Amino acid sequence: MFPITRRQLLQSVSCGFGYMAFAGLAHQAAAKDDFENPLAPKPSHFPAKAKRVILLCMQGGPSHVDLFDYRPELKAFAGKSPGESSGLNGQKGRKLQPSPFEFKPQGKSGLMMSSLWPHLSQHADDLCMINSAYTDVPNHPQAIIQLHTGNFQFVRPSMGSWVLYGLGSDNQDLPGFVTIKPLDRLGGAQNYGSGFLPAVYQGTRIGSSSDSAKGVKFGNIKNEEFSEPLQRKQIDLVQAMNRRLAQRQEANTEIEGIIESYELAFRMQSAVPRLLDIAGESQSTFKKYGIGEGSTDDFGRQCLMARRCAEAGVRFIELTHQGWDQHNNLKSKLTANTKATDQPIAALLSDLKERDMLKDTLVIWSGEFGRTPAVKQDDGRDHNATGFSMWMAGGGVKGGYKHGSTDEFGIAAVEDKFHIHDLHATTLHLLGLDHTKLTFKYAGRDFRLTDVYGNVVDKIIA
Amino acid sequence: MARCFWLALFLSVLGLTNARAADDKAGVQFFEKHIRPVLVAKCYKCHSAETKQAKGGLTLDTREGTRTGGESGKAVVPGNIQDSLLIESLHHEGLEMPPGEKLPADVIAKFEQWVKMGAPDPREGKGLARREINHDEARSFWSLQPIKRPSVPKTSSKWATSNIDQFVAAKHAEKQIVPVSDADTSVLVRRIYFDLTGLPPSPEDQAEFLADAKTDKPAAIRKLVDELLESHHFGERWGRHWLDVVRFAESTGMERNITFPQAWKYRDYVIESFNEDKPFDQFVREQVAGDLLPANDPAKRREQLVATGFLVIGPKSLNERNREQFDLDIADDQIDSTFRTFMGLTAGCARCHDHKFDPITTKEYYSLAGVFLSTDTFYGTTATQGNRQPGRLLAFADGDAKPVKADGGDDDKGKKKKSAQQNDNDDDISDLKNQLLDAEDRLEKARKRADATKGSKQHKKAEQLVDQTKAQVARLTAQLAAATKSQEKPNTDEAQSGKGKRAPDLLMAVLDSKSPGDAQQRLRGEAAERGEKLPRNFLVVGSTGSLPKIEPSSSGRRELAQYLVQNENPLTARVAANRVWQHLMGKGIVGSVDNFGAQGDRPTHPELLDYLASHLRDNGWSIKKLIREIVLSRTYQLAGTSNSAAQKLDPENDFLWRARHRRLEVEAIRDAMLMASGQLDLTPPDNGSAVAQVGDGEVGRGLDPRKFVSVINKRSVYLPIVRTVVPEMLQVFDFPEPSNINGQREVTTVATQALYLMNSSFALDQAEEFAKRVLAVEGVDDTGRVQLAYQLALSRNPSPSERDETVKFAQEVTTSLTADSRSKDSAKLKAWTALCQALYASAEFRYVE
């Protein structure tokens, strides 16, 4: 590499030196840097199977027994109370309600999926279906925070922040943790916050849940007053001042970081809008994702942006789809939700596969909990934390694989129970991180994403 | 042999002992056949003395380890299935072992049979010794030893000009480090202004000081320091430091983020306390037990009640169903905050198990919990749906405080519970409200656009958009009306009770509960797992003498206050003095300012720390006097330059041979921007806080988070601090998470900060005001203007080359913009806006040397 340090470089670069040349040199000299970029790529603890994560957060509590957990016993015992026969708690006065949707084996693996997934079912052999997920509390706010941070009692860093802290970012022109249209309630920013980790690891929000995906923006990415050449000239003035200061204040190593932050910001101004601007994608891609076609348009755009983020090297990408809380109108609302997301998600998986990226992209689909198979109402289900389904794909998990099981009626996970902490431990493991070693010292002790819990679930790893 | 056998049989038949059963051959066979293989296969991985794996402190590969158990209790009590935690965990009741895998019922049955048999177990060897906390031994730890005023080292140093310097010089001599020279006067004045008030000096202030300093520099510095300590801005600066530590915020945060519209009163109390240099011991007492302290007049009574807001403003999980759990969580927040804030001890760690590193037992934790569980916490919050734990506030009038509902209405209970369906409906309503707000915003924008494009080609399109958006607003309005109609009608009495009356003075505060009492220990921190009742008391190591006795009819907070500030407390004065030092020197003598326990850092200058702590105590706990002592030391006044010899010996500058370059806190950066632009309104707000204006409600449901993005040109300490929706600039520049105790801010440097300063409307607006201000000065040329801009932004004159470069920038940009068919004036304003913004954006602007 270059036999020069960043400091020498900065000091040798005078005003007028082309910035592109500077940026290029700066990149090359970065290896010998005494300024530590907290977002620089870091080695994993052991070889990783996944390089990045796309979390598809389905807020509301998707009904597992109508989507992914095939429970024919519900039909056989329809209208009966589950309590007496199974001894399960908390189901008093409720009657078992069969799913109004048909389940069929899909793909070579024969993974059971309901008829609501005509597109996703084509990818059945890539899905690692976890039918034995469970969480601690059947309330949206706590459960959604637990899904993201592992802990709803205290403000803790989110999974994406931990991942970014552990691995850094592969693309220094873009944020390393992006969340598109995140929730603005139910914990809001806590779900992508960095807690006690340094703020650089917090998720970068693009739009919010009330925005439409069309036209979502990244804050402060464009100067509304100055043309680009003028702004460049202005930044050159700033950098000239900064470089002189770096010379004057030899002891202040942070100035180098500031100089770099301006060059990065300037590059981001073109890189980020390019990333979010899907106009250059082909008509067939739009069609594939269902963009411009009514109900699939919004999530289609999100999925396409997720693919673009993944391609660009963003480490952790989260998409949110709300409205899976079917206490009533289960049949129509669940149909609408799957209609809006099925095709876009399938398109995302197939695009990743086409680009040979599915193998090192871990896609996770999950809600905060599931819904009750036994109900009091006719066309709805209530919250159920004791058993639900989530799936993963790519990133080193087994495809066409069913992990764990709920009881005969789908009420509680009984076999190979898979807690949210296990999801976190296993996700980190797939990324090459040991969840017991990825720690941060705060308030006198070493904290982890999984606190003192969590097990890596080897059975689902390919 | 035979006698032994008969004796054993006799005893076990009587049930007097099972000890002999352990030797029973059949029992051992049973163990070898049914128990050991399972233990080996399923348990040893995490619980083995041999491999030193002892999760939860438990080892299961020896009899001793199995019987002694781990942190949760005894794993096996021979003959007693009920008390054997191992059996409970195998059933996945409470603990779940093995994790994620319940063993088959017949295996569990064998374990039960084995325990009933007396748990015969031939495995010899020691379990891993469980650490027993020994308070007396623990006292040898540096921070738990009594604070003694050390004698000032007598060095031959000519350099030292104060007692503090003598301590520092002694270290210099020991490490053979030579300090750099003193800071330039102009550097020093900026440093002192920012450190004491959080504001830069105005050019006039600076000129005055520099003139004074020419005749007698030390006298000029003393005069400046005394003046600034008396300024109202001192409290705004130092009060904010305190607000970081005490997790100040104006909403509950967590899963239901409900506003605290009265929290600003505590904020103002803190600012006032620093301004009047309230003795720090008094400041501590008021925050922990202000409600129990005597007060001569209603104003003092009110002040002391507001002070207890410290115990109230923490984050709250209002969606918690279980009241007991909720109360325990509040007590936990109060214990954790009290001990980390005042004593730098992480007492909260002992909630579920004995502290792993510090001498704090779980029993001590629950002795403290009794104190706080005997306290009523008045935190308010409206009873929105999702708020399962609405609290009350105190209405203060004529020296008397009365519990009332959060809206000030009479305190009555009897809310109707809502069904899941109604909750769903509420969800819909809040979604609709948000959508409607968005649509209304879009409509306004569309209208503006339509106006702006009048007469042009785009006008028609813009008008179409207005019509479409209008239709959308109408649709959403109708939907919202329908949804609201089906919702439960609000209680009209309630809605009207506030009318016609003067708004009551509502306070967040605490009072002793009606029936104070001791708390039961909770095993593993589980609310339902009650252990023994523990008499209210304080942490043993927090006093080098005896502990105050708690009056049985009171909570014990008054005694807690005494305990925190009495001479026998080895920590409070050290922790406070260390924080003051950190804010002035950039790093604490103990680097981990909030943790003085075993996991914290060790002091770099232990004697100096004790000198400062005793200085604080011996001078009537005056924070201002301590600050004065430090700022007037030569150590504080060092330059920030480097020195290669010293750099090699002590690259981290732990031994204080130069000043640290410090990134300003975001409040100071923002205030300095407003100051340079001439837009800073230095008066405190007369309406408390934007949160008080918005009032009660849940953020994101009914309360639009955007409402808190108020544009106020007041000092940043008065910005609304709503958990999870902290103002953007604060978030971008490392404002600490306001749910956590945090006495030490992070300093990160990232591109989002650069983007904020380059592109945010705040930066652009202030730069334009700054430019207007500079351009408005008459009778000076561009060179003079650049000089003024430098003065306003950086408190110094530009060097000739800087000056020329900057003037050239302004002129070139003006020329090129004028060529782009702009009027000369607007081109000039834009060019100077770019110039002023560049000064804001410079690294120098956000650093003090």
Image (tube, coloured by chain):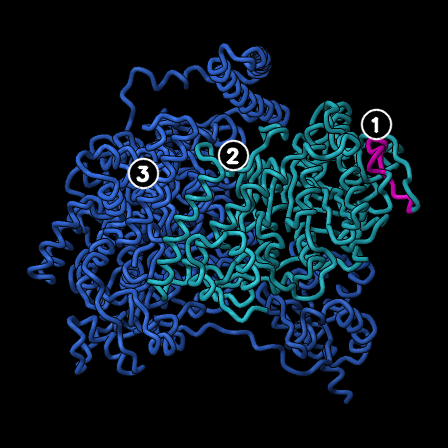
Chain colours: A cyan, B blue
Q: Nearer the viewer, residue B183 or B191?
A: B183
On whether residue A116 falls in the magenta region, the answer is: yes
The reply to whether residue A378 is visible in this rendering is no
**Coordinates of residue A300 in the picture (x, y in percent):** 72, 32
Of marks 2 and 3, the one in the foreground: 3
The reply to whether residue B730 is visible in this rendering is yes
Of the residues shown, which amino acid type is indicated by label 2? Arg
Bin the neighbour count of mark 3 within 10 Å (Cα to Cα): few under 14, some 14-19, many 20 and up: many
Closer to the chain start, of discs 2 and 3, is 2
Using the image, name the chain to which the residue with label 3 belongs.
Answer: B
On whether residue A230 falls in the magenta region, the answer is: no
Give me the disc on residue B388. Answer: 2
A241 vs B123: above or below: above
Using the numbered discs, state the Cα–Cα distance from disc 2 to disc 1 in whole angstroms: 34 Å
Which residue appears farthest toward the right when viewing the image? A108
Q: Quadrant of residue B48?
A: bottom right
Using the image, name the chain to which the residue with label 1 belongs.
Answer: A
Residue at x 82% of width, y 53% of height: A398
Tell if the residue under mark 2 belongs to the same chain as the one under mark 3. yes
Label 3: which residue? B718
Q: Nearer the viewer, residue B412 or A152?
A: A152
Bin the neighbour count of mark 2 within 10 Å (Cα to Cα): few under 14, some 14-19, many 20 and up: some
Give me the disc on residue A100. Answer: 1
